[in-house]
Amino acid sequence: MSRIKRAAVTAGFGYAQYGVAIASGIVLVPLTIHRVGATAYGLWLASGEVLGHAGMVELGVLGVLPWMIAEADGKNHRVAMRRLVGQGVTVASLVGCAYLALSVLGWRLLPGMLHLTAADRRTIFGPLAILVVANAISYPLRVFQGVLAGLQDVYFNGALSLVNAITSATLTAVLLLRGQLLLALALGAALPSVLTLVAAFIRITLVAPDLLTGWARPSLAGIRPLVANGTGVWLGSIGWALVAATNGIVITYLGHPEWVAIYACTSKLSAVSTQLAWILPDSGLVGLAQLYGEHREPGKLGHVVVMMLRLHFLLAGAAACGFLAFNPAFVSRWVGAAYFGGLLLNGLLAASIVASSIGHGLITAASVLGNRPRVGAVTLVNGVVQAVLALLLGRAFGLVGIACAGLIAGLLTAVPAAIVLLHPSTQLTIGRVTREIVGPWILRIAPLVAAAAAAGWFHRLLGLVPSAALAAAIVTAYAWQMRPWYATLPLGPRVAWWLVRLGLMTPIEPIAMPRRSAITLEQA
């Protein structure tokens, strides 16, 4: 199976999984608020963010393991793969114990940090304990799912993640309807996850049983290479945890736990849209790592990174336009106008889709191309800066200040630092990114952003269905506006053929379609 086909399969399952997440979120969030209440739900979200910070003990091992397995598999080095699996299980087991201990410490500190009453503590203790224990057990099991990712078992891994998402949403909804309240959220998140990880282990016993035998006795010298490679990813995970798991804590600390639900509901579609925009370009990271391992010249690597950045801009722009036009009407109908944070917050969240996509695209590329410790440090600085700015700006400007903090932090830290780190291996510069990507993209998207903002402004007049239709029309117009970019992307022949048929791309050479496209594109 080619690199492009593997990436396409991975992206396809990723989009299906997020489709389930969107559909379940539309149902589960209002159901949760109705059954649990805004205050209890806000406390649960904030408590979950505390657990997210406890997960920072992971050391990056689980993040870097698939890349290292893939590299060893490419060399057909089964001994090295077996050693990596054994080391991964050892480190992940220690991480699970550390996570459990840190979560207990966090629980002792949580009431004072979030101003919880005795009643609040009783409400969240049991469900939170279930989630903590399940997460601790999951750490060593996640090694096997990482091994499957490194082996590029894309069909099984994708199906497993999709089943997990569907089962989790279904179980949560059923338990909520049966009156289990926060216990429904805990069991819905924990039980399907553990079961799917067990399924990943069983899969390894069938497709690569040799990787489960002959493990060396755990030793500091043995696990040091894996931990050293994961250090940068670990530092980065701390930064991303600060970025993703800080807003609820800050808002609660500022004395407004009821605002957590408002921010979460207003930003829900933004977060989902951002993740959707990342799936397709991220599916090519393994291929980029393989190219780097082949010691390709900087010009070639730079060309591939620019293509991936174009894809990030292309998808993030579509997501931002759709979000800007549709989200006000969607949130107002979904959970009620009281949970919509306002048009200014909506605009800042739309901008954050693009800004975070730029930062993510640059940072991940720099990490793949051998800058993991430095990328981790940059991401950590970005997270710290955002947390500080969220506290300062949130106190001054409320939810709008919280949203501004993420934008400012990313554009000041992650983006310029990542370009500097990429330059030696790709010859990428800020001038090149601005000239080849940012400038042309802004010229083409500007009128559509104005149209999307106008649609959001009149959401009360338009209503849900007309807002959705208008958002779809704006996104379609954006796709037409961006057609000069499509020929520069690493598309498969059939995708290119369809773009030609739709008038979105000029054929590279004459085609007479049939079963196989006659279009030829350079396969990066």
Image (tube, helix red, strand yellow):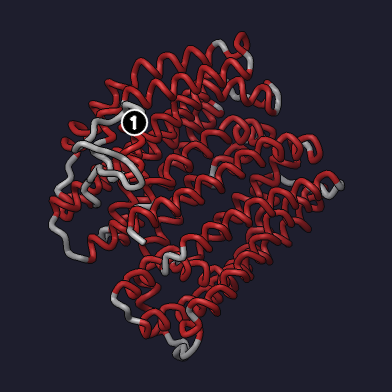
In this view, which residue lies farthest toward the top? 461
Q: Amino acid at mark 1?
A: Arg
At x 77% / y 51%, what residue is drawn?
184
Q: Between residues 292 and 4, which one lies in front from this camera angle? A: 4
Residue 261 locus on image (x, y percent): 66, 35
- Residue density around tag 1, few if under 14, some if 14–19, many if 20 or more, within 10 Å: few
As drawn, 31 above or below 330: below
Q: Is residue 460 left or right of residue 82?
A: right
Q: Describe the element under mark 1 as helix, strand or loop.
A: helix
Q: Is residue 350 left or right of residue 480?
A: right
At x 73% / y 46%, what residue is drawn?
116
Report if residue 108 is visible in the image: no
Residue 175 locus on image (x, y percent): 81, 50
At x 71% / y 40%, what residue is drawn?
28
Give the quadrant of the N terminus. Answer: bottom left
Q: Between residues 502 and 263, which one lies in front from this camera angle? A: 502
Report if residue 159 is visible in the image: yes
Residue 393 locus on image (x, y percent): 48, 31
Quarter where residue 504 is shown? top left
Label tally? 1
Quarter where residue 317 is shown? top left
Quarter where residue 216 is shown? bottom left
At x 45% / y 55%, what residue is drawn?
238
As drawn, 193 above or below 18: below
Q: Which residue is mark 1?
A: 501
Residue 138 locus on image (x, y percent): 61, 68
As drawn, 201 above or below 305: below
Q: Between residues 493 and 88, which one lies in front from this camera angle? A: 493
